[in-house]
Structure formats: C-alpha cells, structure tokens
Amino acid sequence: MLYNIILTMEGDKIISLLNTEGYFLFKNVIPKTEIEFAKKNIKGTKIKYGNLLKFIDTNMLPVVNKKLDWKLINTKYRISNNNNSSDATGLHRDIQLHKEKHIPIFTCLSYLDEEIMELIPGSHSKPVIEAHNLLKYYNKRIRLRIKPGDILLFNASMIHRGIFYKNNNPNRRLIQLFDCIPKELFRRIQPRILHLPCLDKCSSSFSGLIKYISKMEFLISIVIFINYLNVARGYGTNYNFVSKEYLGLSTEANQDRLEPKYNKDIWEDSNLYITRGDLVNNPKDKISYYFFYSQLLNSILFTIYIIVFIVIVIYLLKLSFSS
C-alpha cells in the first residue's frame, strides 16, 4: 500500500509499535532547562509564540526524527494551558480517515506539567469500528502518565482523550503538533487531507459548558461513552459522499485559528490552531453541511440501530417467557 512504507521499516521496534499499537512514549528526551524555558513563555492563557516556536522546532520533531531516522513535517499546532477541555476531554480522533488504515500521519505532543492521557491502542487501524466490536475497543482503554520532558507520538487516527477531573493544578501546559507527515510522502498526503476549522460557527457557550462538566467524573464519563459511539463509528464518514474525495478529515472542533505575530515580547491568546503552510480548508459556506454529515446523521442512525436492537431483544425475551 502506498501510504504504508514508513510504518513497515524492518528492525525498528518503535516503528513496529507505532504500526501495531499506534503510539510510543519517548521518556525524558527534552532537557529540564528547555522545559523551564517553555514554561516561562506560558502565563495563564497567554503565550509568547515567538519563543515557543523555537522550543518546538528544536526540542520536539527534531528529537523524534533523530530517534526514528524520519523527517516528519508539522502542518499545524496548538498550545494550551488547562483550557482545551472543550474538545480534548472526550474520546476523539485528530484525523478521521475514510478508507485507508495505515496512513503515516501523526500527532506529537509534550506536556510541561505531569498529566494523564487515555488511549485506545489499535484503534488507529479501525477508521470505522464494527458495531459488535464497540465495547471490545472501549474496554481496551489505557492511561499513560506523561511527565515534563517526555514526548508522545501517536497515529492521528487513534482514539484518545485528556483527563481533566483528576487535576487540581491550575497549570496544564501542553504543546500539540498536529498532522505530522513524512517529508517523502508530504506532497502525496497533505493535499488530500481536508481541514475543518469552525470559522464563524465557533461557540463560546458550548465550550464553557463542556469545560464545566469535564471536571465532574461521573457526568463526563456518561458523555464520553455516548460520544465514543459516534467517534468509533467514524463520525459518519460513510454517509458523507463529499468526504470521500479525501484521505481524511482533520477536525479543529470548537476552537478558532490564530496568525501569531511571533514577536518574542508579545503575549497572545492560547488554545487556538496555528497553521504552518497552505492547507485544504473546508469552504465557509459548507461548514454546517460537513458537521451535519460527520456527526449528527451518524448519531441519529446509530441511535436508531440501538433502539431497533433493544426492541428485538425485548420481543425475543417476551416470546421466551410466554412459551
């Protein structure tokens, strides 16, 4: 398969794990002095992008590329500080693939504060999980404790989430590099990834609600499971004929974009997507169309499946008891 050449390099255990499990945690690979430097450039929800871009380009992908002998190119990133729960608290995929199962496109992240992340190993190879396997994959969830200085690399199609209700620390500083693609495949893959910014559809009210309930373990657990059913079934890409023109959809949830000034002395807003180069963006007038087909329709159809299944089970039980 064209897009599998990076993931089948023989003799490399890390690449083998990336292929089968979908993730690898590089432990203690960023010097403490660099971590402290990055922390000084995040104050509350304000960022000095001019300094942090230097941190990114020196301590993140260069480290991964050296370890794996790769040349990953980063196409967009986001820096947050305990304010990304509106889209990261639920199980989700950073990119929803349509058909391909092993496209080498990754998310690379570094926490500047010790945190916990939940992953579903192997879910990256299942863009659409079969209905009868939904609970099987849900029960495969694992939690990783990530410390400052660690780098987590995972397939962008892997289902994952951040844990917020166990954190009483005011700081949860996180640098995320999205859509990292091997240089030799960049021109083949990047133009066929459709990016979905929320544009004028961003809702601060919705973000505030999710941030509020993300701190409540019982309530957010219910929300997470219901949302997982939608995510695991592929966000409805099977019903969206327009999305079939692309290898995958790169969602940006409910956060806007920013064009940083990259001035080392200027503080700017955090938790906003920043692009690095030209991306194929969803047209503004079709954004509602994509959201409808990628989530609402899928949820409605899957709810109908569940109702029909329950009705059949009740009917069969009734027959068995009456006989």
Image (cartoon, helix red, strand yellow):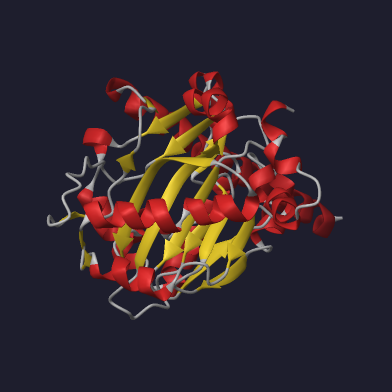
Name the spot of residue 267 as percent of width and height, x first: 14, 57
Q: Is residue 78 left or right of residue 9?
A: left
Name the spot of residue 139 as percent of width and height, x first: 67, 63
Can you name the residue that lies furthest to the right here?
A: 323
Quadrant showing the N terminus: top right
Identity of the residue drawn at 38% across and 25% down: 289
Quadrant showing the C terminus: bottom right
Front-lying residue, 97 or 227: 97
Q: Is residue 182 left or right of residue 284?
A: right
Figure check: 303 above or below 109: above
Identity of the residue drawn at 71% across and 34% down: 4
Quadrant hosting residue 5? top right
Q: Is residue 130 left or right of residue 301?
A: right
Q: Is residue 226 visible?
A: no
Can you name the residue that lies furthest to the bottom here?
A: 168
Identity of the residue drawn at 75% across and 57% down: 13
Name the spot of residue 264 as percent of width and height, x first: 17, 55
Quadrant hosting residue 207? bottom left
Name the spot of residue 46 as percent of width and height, x first: 19, 61
Can you name the residue that lies furthest to the left here?
A: 266
Quadrant hosting residue 137? bottom right
Q: Is residue 32 left or right of residue 273?
A: right
